[in-house]
Image (cartoon, grey):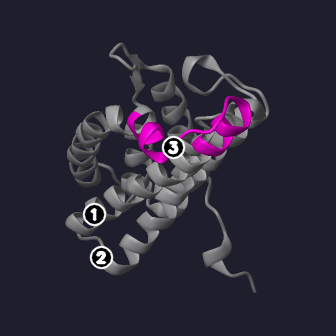
Amino acid sequence: MENSSLKIKTIDITYIAIFAALIVICSWISIPTQPPFTLQTFAVFCALGLLGAKKGTASVLVFLFLGAIGLPVFSGFKGGIGAILGATGGYMVGFIFMGIIYRIGEIIGKGKNVINIIAMVIGLLVCYAFGTFWFMVVYTKNTGAIGFGKAFSLCVLPFIIPDIVKLILADILIVKLRKALRIGGTSL
């Protein structure tokens, strides 16, 4: 007898693929500020919030896999393992940690929106920390030593307010779409 909890449904695969594509498209959208930022994090928030941690993280993994094999899915139409292993690749890998922390929030919060938001904020902070550490290691190897404060001011500080805005907008969209997107009596 098959275990139905281990089966993945075609609709789940479809949603995972759609949200992986959304992450790709949002990584290509660059807001021309100094420094420029993309909507990639917004798409990750939406994937986690609408699909849940497991399927949302699967979307992130598909996105990273497509980029790793060389497809130009990252910001600036970059691709390849070198983009992931580069100085800012840790922030993309950090999206996986966002999914893990969001899953913990799902377990603790049992669907409460405030817990989901807290889990996304904590996940983003872990993503920042992991990405900054990664940046420091790669930067030191390629250019020379860099302190945490300098790395933080270059890689995190300019993105805090845009990421807060993206989180708020994603939450508004998630709440609206959860109500609207009910298929066969169940939501995404």
Amino acid type, callout 3: Gly
Q: Are marks 3 and 1 in contact (CB under 8 Å)?
A: no
Residue 3, placed above or below residue 172: below
| Picture quadrant where residue 58 is located | bottom right
> What's the residue at 36%, 13% (across, down)?
32
> What's the residue at 45%, 35% (across, down)?
155
| Picture quadrant where residue 165 is located | top left
- Say which of 115 and 83 sits in front: 83
Magenta stretch?
Answer: 136-153
Magenta span includes 105: no
**Mark 2 surroundings within 10 Å by alpha-carbon count, few (fewer than 14), some (14 through 19), many (20 or more):** some
For label 3, the residue is: 147
Q: Closer to the N terminus: mark 2 or mark 3?
A: 2
Which of the image's four quarters has the N terminus? bottom right
Which of the image's four quarters has the C terminus? bottom left
For label 1, the residue is: 118
Give the x, y percent position of residue 36: 40, 19
